[in-house]
């Protein structure tokens, strides 16, 4: 999960360096929207299960939620 996100961000940086804004935007869209949806769903799941909400929310914001 983490490596896929890093690869998409590197690819997006390559598109930006090449000046191809459309592909950069599409790459960011297809990389960040699924990340946001996964994090939101995991926050709601952990909200029902755990008691240490601030730590879990911080881990999700740092994109470490799936590793938890």
Image (cartoon, rainbow, N blue to C red):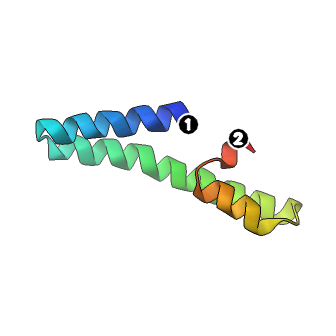
Looking at the rendered structure, the secondary structure element under dot 2 is helix
Residue in the image at 41% along x and 31% along y? 7
On screen, residue 20 versus residue 48, left or right, reads: left
Residue 37, quarter of the rendered image: bottom right
Q: Position of residue 43 (x, y in %)?
A: 70, 60
Q: Which mark is residue 2?
A: 1
On screen, residue 52 versus residue 64, left or right, reads: right
Q: Position of residue 15 (x, y in %)?
A: 21, 37
Q: Point out the tag, 2 or 1, that comes first from the N-terminus.
A: 1
Residue in the image at 26% along x and 48% along y? 25
Location of the N terminus by quadrant is top right
On screen, residue 15 versus residue 41, left or right, reads: left
Residue 33 visible to the viewer: yes
Residue in the image at 62% along x and 54% along y? 39
Q: Position of residue 16 (x, y in %)?
A: 19, 42
Residue 30, quarter of the rendered image: top left
Residue carrying label 2: 67
Residue in the image at 70% along x and 40% along y? 67
- Which of these two is toward me, 44 or 4? 4
Q: Are the residues tagged 2 and 1 within 8 Å (C-beta)?
A: yes
């Amino acid at each position: 999960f983490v490596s896929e996100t890093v690869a998409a961000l590197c690819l997006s940086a390559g598109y930006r360096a090449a000046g191809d804004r459309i592909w950069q935007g599409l790459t960011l869209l297809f990389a960040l929207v699924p990340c946001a949806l996964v994090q939101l769903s995991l926050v709601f799941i952990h909200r029902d299960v755990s008691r240490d909400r601030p730590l879990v929310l911080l881990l999700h914001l740092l994109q470490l939620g799936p590793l938890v």
